Amino acid sequence: MPEATTERTFVYVTFIRTTPERLWTALTTPEFTRQYWYGREIESDFRPGSPVRYRYDDGAALDIEGEVLAADPPRLLSYTFTDPGDRERGDKPSRVTFTIEPAEDFEGVVQLTVTHDEFAPGSPTYEGVANGWPGVLAGLKSVLETGGPLRYAGEQAGPVRVPDLSGRPNDLVVEHDFSASPEQLYAAWTERFDQWFAIPGTVRMTPQVDAPFYFEVEYRPEQSAVSERHPHYGRFLRLEPAKLVELTWVTGRGGTEGAETVVTVELSPHGDGTHLRLSHRGFADAASRDGHEKAWPFVLEQLDDRIG
C-alpha cells in the first residue's frame, strides 16, 4: 500500500504474519536480506552513529551505504541511505525508517511501515525507491511467511552460497547413539525443533535448500534467576532425507557471537537405532567453540529424551 506525498516522502505499509523479533532479525541480518533484497547482504552493529552497508557479489561490491540514526529493537530502525547514483551526483543522503508494531486488527500479524524521506532536491532517487521498495518488501513478506523468496517467472535458483570458513579453523565434533530411527531424527532437525530445542511457537522453518529459518531458545545463565531468550537463525545448505542435514548456524552474545557457522548432522543406522555425528565448524574464536563443545552433548541428550 504505497503512498507518495507532496513532500517527496515515500510510505509503504504491509502486514506480515510473523513476530516483531523475527521481522527485526530479517531486516538486520545478511542471512535474510540476501534472500529478499536481490542478493544484497546488510552489515552493521546497528548502534546509532555506526555505518550500515549493503554489499553483493559475496561482499566484493558496495551498493547502499549509510549511518544508523536510531535503533530500538524490535520496534524501530532508521538510517541514512546513499545509493551508487547519489554517490556519483554528490547528493546528500536520504533517510529510511522502519517502524514495527503489532497489527491491531489481526492476530499473530505485525504491521511494518517503511518511510523514506529527506531526498535531495530534484534527486531521481525518489523514483528509484518508489519503484524498488514494493518488490523488496513483497520478498521480505514471502521469506517470513513461506520460508522462501519471490522468484521471477522462469527464474532458476542460483548456486547455494557456502560460507568461507578458511579463516576460522575452530571446529568441534560430537557423536551420540539414539534409539530413534534416522527418519525420526531427520524430521527433528528439519521440522520439529519445537519438540526438543526451540520455544514452541517461535519456529519458522521450511526444509528446503537455501531457505532461511528462525527460532528462539530459552536459557538461564549460571547464577541468574531470570531466563533469557536467544534467537537462532540460518539456512539449509544440504538436505538428504534420513541421512544428512547441513545448515548455517548464527546466534548472538554467548553463542557464535554473530559468526556464520556451519552445523553438519550425519545420520547412519546403528543396530535398532541411529548413530548421529555432529560437526560444528567456523567459530570466530576458541572460547566460542569450547562453549558449544560443552553444550552440544546436553542438547543431544535432550533430543534423545524427547524423541527416543
Image (cartoon, rainbow, N blue to C red):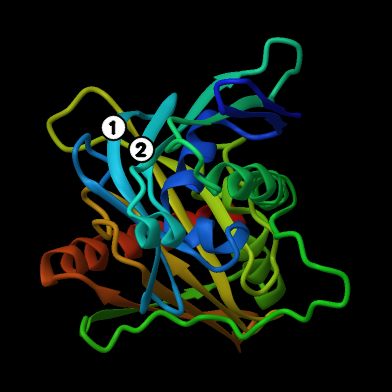
What's the residue at 52%, 39% (across, down)?
22
Q: Are marks 1 and 2 in contact (CB under 8 Å)?
A: yes
Q: Residue furthest right?
A: 153
Label 2: which secondary element:
strand
Would you say residue 250 is visible in this rendering? no
| Label annotation for residue 79 | 2
Q: Residue furthest top?
A: 104
**Mark 2 residue type:** Tyr
Instruction: Classify the position of the C terminus by image quarter.
Output: bottom right
Image position, residue 185 (x, y; %):
62, 68
Image position, residue 272 (x, y; %):
65, 81
What's the residue at 26%, 55% (across, down)?
255
Q: Residue furthest front?
A: 122
Left or right of residue 187: residue 129:
left
Look at mark 1 in the image and give the residue it sits on.
Answer: 69
Label 1: which secondary element:
strand
What's the residue at 35%, 58% (across, down)?
87
Q: CA distance from mark 1 to mark 2?
A: 5 Å
